[in-house]
Image (spheres, grey):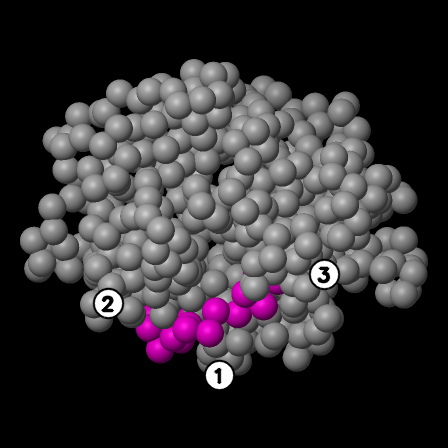
Amino acid sequence: MHEMTPWKRIDAYRLELPRTGEMRVAGLIYVDETLERQLVKDQAPKQVQNVAHLPGIVGASIAMPDIHWGYGFPIGGVAAFDYESGVVSPGGVGSDLARLADSLFTTIPAGVGRGGEVNLSHKQLRKVLAQGASWAVGEGYGDAGDIERLESGGCLSWANPDEVSETALKRGKCQLGTLGSGNHFCEVGVVDEIFDTRAADAFGLRRGQITVMIHSGSRGLGHQVCDDFLSVMARYVQKNNLSLPDRQLACAHVTSSAGQRYLGAMAAAANYAFANRHVLMALAQRAVQAALSLAPRELQLRTVYDVAHNIAKIEKHEVDGKMRRLVVHRKGATRALGPGHPEIPSRYQPVGQPVLVPGDMGSESWVLVGTAAAASESFGSSCHGAGRVMSRKAAMRQAKGRNIDDELDARRIIVRAQKRGTLAEEMPAAYKNVAEVVEVVHGAGLAKKVARLRPLVVVKG
């Protein structure tokens, strides 16, 4: 049993977990003094320390200010592993407004296990897993011009659909173009403040503009891929006598058969997620057009960016003065590339990559921009959201007897959900203050504030 290493403050935005015992690197947590007080509420810092024990980890075991307890890795965790000697781990990979709300709610399928209008054959599903968002465009969902504004062009080329189990395929067959439940949502907001005019102009954002933000992923297919490979990794750990502080950190060396199989299956699930979000945005456009009686030309809805989270990506980063090929795990964290990076769309090259940080149902969401500093300190990573401070069960207890939809309505936010229980589980008090989380990321220089989006309409499962 590994004891928790006491942390020490480096500066106003950073804590360090010094390297002790069998830790291969130190831990680095981005929090200010206010958010530091919340660290003692769960064992997430211990998970940062645990990740630091994994073979091949480089730099530091990192956590963003939205850090909270996860499976194996903390949510908000970032870790990079050498491609040749490191590991990959599944645990490191969560108008008329009322009429508009109703239109979105009826057009976008949401909820646990809910199917949608896209019912795939086995052959079509394999194409989705291989082609990602480009499959959706080929089927008439979305615009081909949006593809360059998706992370990795909406497709990971090293995906291997053959490594996705039949169980996962069955779960994904009818769920493409569906929102899911939990913290997944479709949110209509308004840009109420601009902090960086140059970046906002590059992203096409202006004050008073109406926006649509979608948070969803690979649905049941991706969840099944993770479950399938946790058992594969557990057998690998036992067979190869890997010493781990937590069995939830089950892993396999990247270059091993198990590691390569998992990376191929995970990339296929990521491609499903890219396609899913592209279909969902097309459905959202359809709903807005219907609610407001607008033609596509009048609506002028286009993608600013689609950024992935809960993913491990093969990237090159400088470590100790040398460029190394790494597998960067981002769990509840997201990419934040700085100006000039070759993977950024051409129109964003001068300013950096858009970083999307959703809040809870009752508070603002944010658009940030990646920085060069993030590349040298956090493997080009930023936070992805506010981060929970309350379990779903605790939120349900606290919400008992309350009408969360009425409370949001009093704040001039219209919400539609398949189940009242979802609103209780996802009530604003269950999350950290997203403005404080963003302030840490901004102050630490990982990503800079561009625009604040105030929610008007939220659709959940």
Task: Say what amino acid the circle numbered 1 marks.
Answer: Lys
Measured as percent of width and height from the top left, residue 281 is found at 69, 59
**Magenta region, residue range:** 150-170
Residue most extreme to the front: 321
Mark number for residue 40?
A: none
Question: Which residue in the structure is indicated by mark 2?
Answer: 255
For label 3, the SS is helix
Q: CA gap, disc 2 to disc 1?
A: 29 Å
Residue at the image position 8 percent from the left and 59 percent from the top: 239
How many residues crowd mark 3 within 10 Å: few (<14), some (14–19), many (20+)?
A: few
Residue at the image position 24 percent from the left and 63 percent from the top: 84
How many residues crowd mark 2 within 10 Å: few (<14), some (14–19), many (20+)?
A: some
**Front residue (pair 140, 375):** 375
For label 2, the SS is loop
Residue at the image position 79 percent from the left and 29 percent from the top: 412
Q: CA gap, disc 3 to disc 2?
A: 36 Å
Measured as percent of width and height from the top left, residue 125 is found at 50, 76
Comparing labels 3 and 2, the label whose residue is closer to the camera: 3
Would residue 167 be counted in the magenta stretch? yes
Question: Which residue in the structure is indicated by mark 3?
Answer: 347
